[in-house]
Amino acid sequence: MITKEQKQELISEAAKALAFSYSPYSHYQVGCAVLLADGEIVSGCNVENASFGATVCAERVAIWKAVSEGHKKFVAAAVATKKGWYPCGMCLQVMAEFMNDVPVLIVDQDQNVTETSFKSLFPNSFSPKNF
Ligand code: THU
């Protein structure tokens, strides 16, 4: 369970991260914030590259930042884009490694929020449970 205040903070951190998006090629800005079990929030934005394949999505930046700082328990995520789009398949796969059925908040530029869950976005994920 996450509190209303935590949700609000997660949404605003995702929106803040979007503003740091480095996306000179697609001009598609994405921000992501993840809430960790200890209450900390870590955020990330998409970082593009002139060699397009080297681009990393916002969700993966946020998750990898958190994991590389010693965190492995994720309790919620928020993803902000202009039109409230959903995470790509590659990010869902990375989320599957660390998230079970956590709430995922999809945020648009007017801060409209669609609340879904990781499980409904990726119901039969290939994940650590397969090992
Ligand atoms: N992007 C993300 O950051 N997250 C997603 O889930 C989908 C796509 C980024 C990658 C690239 O910089 C831009 O959006 C267009 O694909």
Image (cartoon, rainbow, N blue to C red):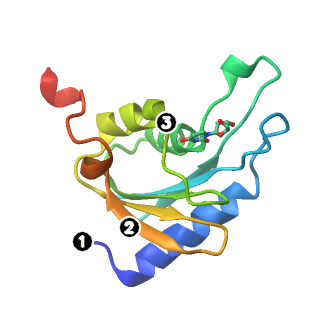
Which numbered dot is residue 1?
Answer: 1
Q: Residue at x 68, y 27 (%)?
A: 55
How many residues crowd around disc 2 within 10 Å: few (fewer than 14), some, or many (20 or more)? few
Quadrant containing the N terminus in the rendered view: bottom left
Three-letter code for the amino acid on which mark 2 is drawn: Glu
The answer to which of marks 1 and 2 sits earlier in the sequence is: 1
Q: Residue at x 56, y 53 (%)?
A: 32
State the CA–CA distance, disc 1 to disc 3: 25 Å
What percent of the width, then of the height, locates residue 105? Answer: 43, 63
Q: Residue at x 47, y 42 (%)?
A: 63
Q: Does residue 29 appear in this view?
A: yes
Helix, strand or loop at disc 1?
A: loop
For this view, does 13 lie left or right of residue 6?
right
Which numbered dot is residue 104?
Answer: none
Helix, strand or loop at disc 2?
A: strand
List the residue tagged with mark 2: 115
What percent of the width, then of the height, locates residue 72? Answer: 34, 43
